[in-house]
Amino acid sequence: MTGWGALIIGDEIMRGGRQDRHFTRVVEILAARGLHLDWATYIGDDRGRLIETLRRSMAGCDVLFSFGGIGVTPDDHTRQAAAEAAGAALALHPDAETEIRARFAETGAEITPQRLQLGEFPIGSRIIPNPYNRIPGFSLDEHHFFPGFPQMAWPMLEWVLETYYSDRFHAIAEAEAAIIVWDGSEGTLLELMRRIEAGYPRASLFSLPSFGTETMGRHIELGMRGEPSQVEAAMAEIRDEVTRLGFTWEEKR
């Protein structure tokens, strides 16, 4: 089953110099289309690690969205790492060249070899249009590579989803429901959780304990997400058993 992954690249994130903004926004963009991330990886500007990470990912069947490192400065390694991982050479993509030349023609700037390097992608790539400044990203099979700048990357991500994956939007009906179990402990509810997990294979149970806050006491958020009829049936069983065990609970809003 194909999953959805995110690769977020940059020493500045790993060392705390810049806060990542991509993860939260990717979750939102996917959720608006009935999709969700299955995994995410953060990695610094190390070409060897990038090559191995991409090589593993390319050996699977997941769709990957990669953010950062597609420039031409010495700390940008993503284009080269993607080429190495795919066993492909880098070459100036003709569509990328057209976009880059048009971009700098608009400003009257010189078209330098360094600027054209921005369009050197692994052979076999497709470009991803950049509505912000026309310097494209690239797609290689199911891997999609964006700049690290949010104002560029996010509309490019939406373009990729709308162009290649619109048939998957809201393809799987999914529901989610949960209750707040006051003063509950996971140990006391463990047998129930195991029985529910085994009995409803088309839904997933989640348990989020909390030691409490100033406004809420100790509690567990206990719920299900997945196929709607299974979520409904599982939650009915959970409510009945939590009540039988003597806990006070309420629906999560």
Image (cartoon, rainbow, N blue to C red):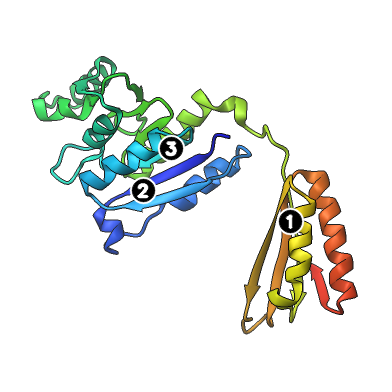
Q: Quadrant of the N terminus?
A: top right
Of labels 3 and 1, earlier in sequence is 3
Q: Position of residue 104 (x, y in %)?
A: 19, 25
In the image, taking residue 219 as reference, residue 26 lies left or right, namely: left
Label 1 crowd bin: few (<14), some (14–19), many (20+), radius 10 Å? some
Task: Identify the residue position indicated by label 3 in the image.
Answer: 64
* Element carrying mark 1: helix
For image coordinates 42% across by 38% down, the residue present is 65
On screen, 133 above or below 210?
above
Q: Please, is residue 15 above or below residue 133 in the view?
A: below
Residue type beneath disc 2: Ile
In this view of the protein, which residue sits in the foreground, 85 or 239? 85
Q: CA distance from mark 3 to mark 1?
A: 29 Å
Residue in view at x 79 percent, y 66 percent: 192
Tell me if mark 2 has few (under 14), some (14-19) or many (20+) residues whose alpha carbon lies within 10 angstroms of its own.
many
Q: Which residue is mark 1?
A: 197
- 203 to the left or right of 77: right
Label 3 is placed on what type of residue? Leu
Q: Earlier in the sequence, mark 1 or mark 2?
A: 2
Q: Is residue 186 above or below residue 87?
A: below
Q: Which residue is mark 2?
A: 8
